[in-house]
Amino acid sequence: MSSEPQFLSFKGLKQYTPEHGWDQVNAVLQAHTQAPSAPEPAARYAAEQVPPDNVPTLTETPEPAPQTNASPLFDPLIQELFEQLRVPPSDELTQTWRTIAAEVNLLTQRMALQRELQERLHKLDQDLADLRGTILTHLNDVQQAADQQLTSARLRAEVSALAQTKLAAKLKPHR
């Protein structure tokens, strides 16, 4: 973060910067206002006016409160958290994360393969269903042809039996 005044610069507001940790915004403003530069007209106008007692302004520079363990603003848990964040991870932890990353990559690959195999299986199931339908259609065609042949054979047998009966009647000696 830069040392520029922040958008929310109020008295007592804390702000985290990697270089300084949790600083009060007013301390940053104080350091910024002590820099040798010509004040801007708006800042000069605000400095000339007397603000009410309880309204913070950007030009106020209150003295920073000493941070001791007895201060209500000091939180040892936050301090401990930031100390833990500053400590680089141990080799064991790094190796564990690398193992996890490798396993996640393998899982992703296997899931992609599973998805591909499921798609292929679905296509194969469709092909099998289509093939079964085609076989059933051909069996139906064969059955119809066989039924037609059977019907034709029955008609021929009936015609032959009738012709035999008629011919036998004609060839029989009359008495």
Image: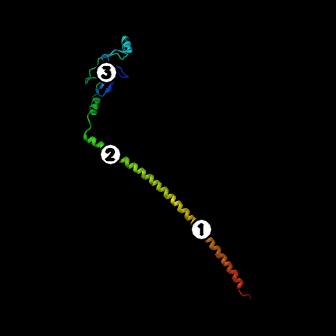
Amino acid type, callout 2: Ala
Q: Which one is earlier in the sequence, the residue at label 1 or at label 3?
A: 3
Which quadrant is the N terminus positioned in? top left
- Amino acid type at circle 3 is Val
Q: Which mark is residue 28?
A: 3
Q: Which mark is residue 145?
A: 1
The residue lying at 29 percent from left, 43 percent from top is: 96
Q: Along the line of sight, which residue is nearer the eye, 19 or 39? A: 39
- Find out whether the residues at labels 2 and 1 contact each other: C-beta distance under 8 Å: no
**What residue lies at 51% left-to-right and 58% top-to-bottom?**
130
In this rendering, the answer to whether 14 lies above or below 127 is above
Res 47 → quadrant: top left
The C terminus - image quarter: bottom right
Residue pointed to by mark 2:
102
Q: Which residue is pictured at 33% across the width and 46% down the height? A: 103
Residue at disc 3, secondary structure:
helix
Measure how far apart labels 2 and 1 are at the Cα level: 64 Å
Point out residue 50 in the picture as x, y percentages from the top left corner. Answer: 37, 11
Q: How many other residues sit within 10 Å of disc 2, few (<14), some (14-19) or many (≥20)? A: few
Spatial distance from mark 2 to mark 3, Cα to Cα?
45 Å
Residue furthest to the bottom in view is 175
Most extreme residue toward the right is 175
Dot 3 surroundings within 10 Å: few (below 14), some, or many (20 or more)? Answer: some
Mark 2 vs 3, N-terminal side: 3
